[in-house]
Image (spheres, coloured by chain):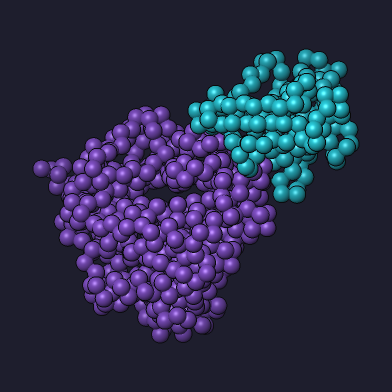
Chain colours: A cyan, B purple
Amino acid sequence: MTLTARDIAEITRLLEDSSFDELELEIDGLKIHLRRGGAPVSRNGAREGLTPLAAPQPAAPIAAKAGAGGSVRAAQPVDPALTEVRAPLLGTFYRAPKPGAPPFVDVGASVEPDTVIGIIEVMKLMNAVRAGTRGVVREIRARDGTLVEYGETLLLVDARESH
Amino acid sequence: MTIRRILVANRGEIAARIVRTCDKLGIETVLAASEADRDSLPARLATRTVCIGPAHPTASYLKPELQVQAALGTDCDAVHPGYGFLAERAVFARLCEQNGITFIGPTSEQLAIAGDKLAARAAAASVDVPVAPGGEAPSREVARELAARIGMPLLVKAAGGGGGRGMQRVERAEDLDAALDLAAAEAGAAFGDARVYLERFVARARHVEVQVLGDGAGNIVHLGERDCSVQRRYQKIIEETPAPGLAAGLRSRLHDAALRFAGRLRYRGAGTVEFLVDAHRDEFYFLEMNARIQVEHPITELVSGVDIVAAQIAIASGNGLRLVRGEAWRDGCAIECRINAEDPARDFAPSPGTVRSVRWPDGEGIRVDTHIESGARVPPFYDSLLGKIIAHGRDRAQALTRLRAAISVTRIDGIHTNLGLHAEILTDPEFNSGGVDTGYLERLLGKRPARAAVAHHG
């Protein structure tokens, strides 16, 4: 098995939420050493940022040979009753009009075909993404501030629950 | 600067070719693929694939901002543009430069000069590299005067063209005005630049080009020449190195001219300086510089022992030409056949579809660069190149023998290809004697109907 950048982020979060201070992981010759950053850690102390140590630069190695090429959306099956709202172009996906602002939509929100559900930025150019369908948002798949590919599923809408 | 992750902004055989060298160098690759290429061989070879847009290249491969965004979003520190698409677009190189991404190729200024065929002509002339008689034709009056001095036949060429595109051949003086109008209109539409110029048409010329590598600091080396005279409608079909039957003096003058031209630009990266050679008159003319890796680069690699993609990456990393100088110069001859998805029975119209099964050749001295496997789709949106079969031998005769055998065992089912044409050329006595001119293939094809008729009755 192999690690993606997303896996590393997930592992980092697991450590962050755990009661451990350090984690060492070796998979397929790739060694990751994670430690809570800052001064000597006190179990009871405030939680501080995590510093990945031995992860190769830049970021972490990306999807491995064996499973490479597989698209993001292929990895997660979709309930056939749900409608996928897909990225109309490649770029950085934002859920909110600006940092700190409430998201355009959240799980449970009702959307109309022309409801803006997010923004995709391509080289400083902001493109509004519309739902294109009517229903209730059941799941948000794309993470805020990350690269989405053309055609990648951003969120899932349940048309049966249309209000 | 160390390059750790490269965005491959291309598709097809060259994308697969770039990924292979990156693998060897321990560099990760992100393939920027259109929707039609998500399941292609390069997509499976690359460390990761991102889908940058729909199948049509104007909405995907030809969009500089999507490519740069994809590179930024996947933490790539460099972009390899391959050939075609954005490879020679100064605006793309500049966008990479502005966003802190290393463009594996020349500077945007060098691309602008090489891309402006009039500027390139002027640069050539300034370092005593001969150019064909001609010049800019800003008006009909200037053009007529110029044409009278050049003589007929001549070519009307687009300043923004190149690679055989945007050219009109004029046989008679009375056809000049019409050709000028047509060329200017086409050039404006195709290249966004309506400037045209005239150049003498050199009949019975050979197309010989010189592979150069520059470090961007004024050091230039050449890796010998390639003869690409077997062409159909200015598109190369077979290339070989060394150019057969060139006098030693002419050969080294070509090499020197290429070094002078690239030196004038303080060229950075891999490039090719193209010439028209009139072997009988012992003369040559500068044609243009291709500021990128060429389709036919493997023949140079087999004879020189230099991995040109690795050399490009080394230069882009700031390591200059050290790797190149360390390589041993191998010898011999290498010949390449471009295998295209096209239908010889329908005037070589593109033949897209699904490759039911394919068998590529192997064996001593044989190299195949391809992205096509059994079951591969050949989309109608892109060029028709399926792969390149390249043979290396200690001399031309051995390379030809190997190549003929390789072509004869190659099987591609499900789509039409030009394999039969290659088999025909490789056994043709004129090609075998070496040194054909650029009109050779059209003459060979012109003979075919008669021959077919004879065969039919016999």
The quarter holding residue A149 reads top right
Q: Is residue A25 above or below residue B418?
A: above
Figure quadrant of the N terminus of chain B: bottom right
Is residue B305 in view from this perspective?
Answer: yes
Between B43 and B393, the residue placed more toward the observer is: B393
Residue B98: quadrant of the picture = bottom right
Q: Residue at x 21, y 46 (%)?
A: B402
Q: Position of residue B191 (x, y in %)?
A: 56, 61
Residue that protrudes farthest toward the right in the picture: A101
Extreme front residue here?
Answer: A40
Decide which of B130, B104 is in the foreground and name it: B104
Query: x, y percentage for residue A66?
Result: 50, 28
Q: Residue at x 49, y 51 (%)?
A: B82
Say left or right for B355 vs A18.
left
Using the image as rendered, state which of residue B136 and residue A110 is in the foreground.
A110
Q: How many marks?
A: 0
Q: Position of residue B39 (x, y in %)?
A: 50, 32
Q: Residue B48 in the image: x percent, y percent?
A: 56, 36
Viewer-side residue, A28 vs B111: A28
Can you say which quadrant of the picture contains the C terminus of chain B?
A: top left
| Identity of the residue drawn at 20% across and 42% down | B405
Query: Does the rendering let one see residue B190?
Result: no
Q: Is residue B404 left or right of residue B208?
A: left
Q: Is residue B355 left or right of residue B157?
A: left
Q: Please give left or right for residue B400 compared with residue B87 in the image.
A: left
Which residue is painted at 47% across and 73% down in the image? Answer: B263
